[in-house]
Image (tube, rainbow, N blue to C red):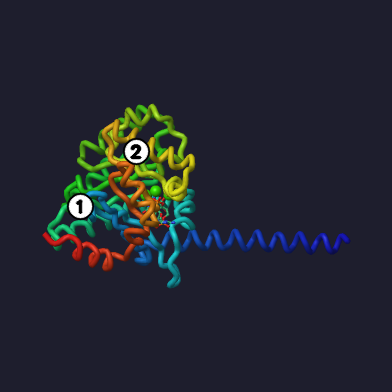
Amino acid sequence: ASKAGGDVTIEYGKKLNEQLLSRLQLETDLRHAIERGELELYYQPQQSMNDEGLIGFEALIRWRRNGELVSPASFIPLAEETGLIVTIGDWVLEQSCLQLQKWMTDAKCRITVAVNISPLQFADPFFVNKVERIITASGVNPACIELEITEGVMVNDIGATTKMLKALQNIGVRLAIDDFGTGYSSLSYLTQLPVEKLKIDQSFVRDITVASPQQTVVQATIGLAHNLGMIVIAEGVETEVQQRLLKSWGCDEIQGYYYSRPLQASAASVFLYSRKIT
Ligand code: C2E
Ligand code: CA
Ligand code: CA
Ligand code: CA
């Protein structure tokens, strides 16, 4: 019996070891992903509910690791744990600005690129300077860059957060609250934050086609945001029924598979040029 138990322990130890090794390997690989040029941005179109159509794109990161496309859900958490997200985040912002600059030159139209900002990036005291430096270097209009922050960054110190957001606004970038409704921020924060846009999380959008608490939450959120002078975008919109409902409730913009999946830069360019000829 003791031998069997020993084997189990050895097996268990082996497994732990393997997990640890693969995590270490992942971390090492991620460290080199940028310099090896393995990171890539996809761009998901965002659509206005009025006749304007395409208003811009959200930049979403992908990692081409050993030829396979890795989703951010499986490496962003590790990037955050290890602090690598700061370097990655700089790259994402730089890359987004360069792409936008290219689109502006080619299409000569006004679109925005939305960039996800991790709470760790936001915690960097030099973050505002960095954003300003990257945007200035690229030559894009700061008003065409939108930073998406989650409720998580605001729960700590509302005073410091507000100051930071105001500084970002002074640079001229736009701000959006991402995944709205999934965090723990109190609604009273919302009235104090200098934020232009609210993104309703896809977990709420999923169930709006039937009478549900989600329906009520989405309708109330749209009303609240509008009363505070904010624009509302719903994410994860997959069907025409969802799109029509959101429109009837006054939602300003949508993003989701119904309009388009996230696209590689080249495909996003085709999407843009076919819709925006000025
Ligand atoms: P997110 O910011 O909430 O991005 C929306 C996610 O929903 C994306 O997943 C997008 O591909 C997916 N999506 C879009 N439309 C639909 C739809 O109609 N149905 C469904 N089911 N899903 C849809 P993705 O690209 O896998 O990204 C996952 C998360 O990883 C993002 O969630 C964001 O939190 C994070 N992320 C992505 N890129 C970056 C980045 O550059 N920096 C940071 N810090 N985080 C990033
Ligand atoms: Ca986002
Ligand atoms: Ca989101
Ligand atoms: Ca999300």
Q: Which residue does the image show at 58% across and 62% down from the upper left? A: 21
Instruction: Give the spatial CA distance, label 1 vs label 2.
Output: 20 Å
Circle 2 is placed at which residue position? 222
Helix, strand, or loop for circle 2? helix
Q: Quadrant of the N terminus?
A: bottom right
Amino acid found under the numbered disc labelled 2: Ile
> Which residue lies at the image location 56% right of the left edge and 63% below the top edge?
22
Rendered position, 150 above or below 277: above
**Place of residue 92 in the rendered image (x, y in percent of width and height, measured from the top left):** 32, 55
In the rendered image, the vertical position of residue 37 relative to residue 117, given as above or below:
below
Residue at the location (47% across, 57% down)? 75
**Residue beneath label 1, please?**
51
Residue 177 in sight here: yes
Q: Nearer the viewer, residue 158 or 112?
A: 112
Which residue occupies the extreme right position in the image?
1
Q: Is residue 51 left or right of residue 7?
A: left
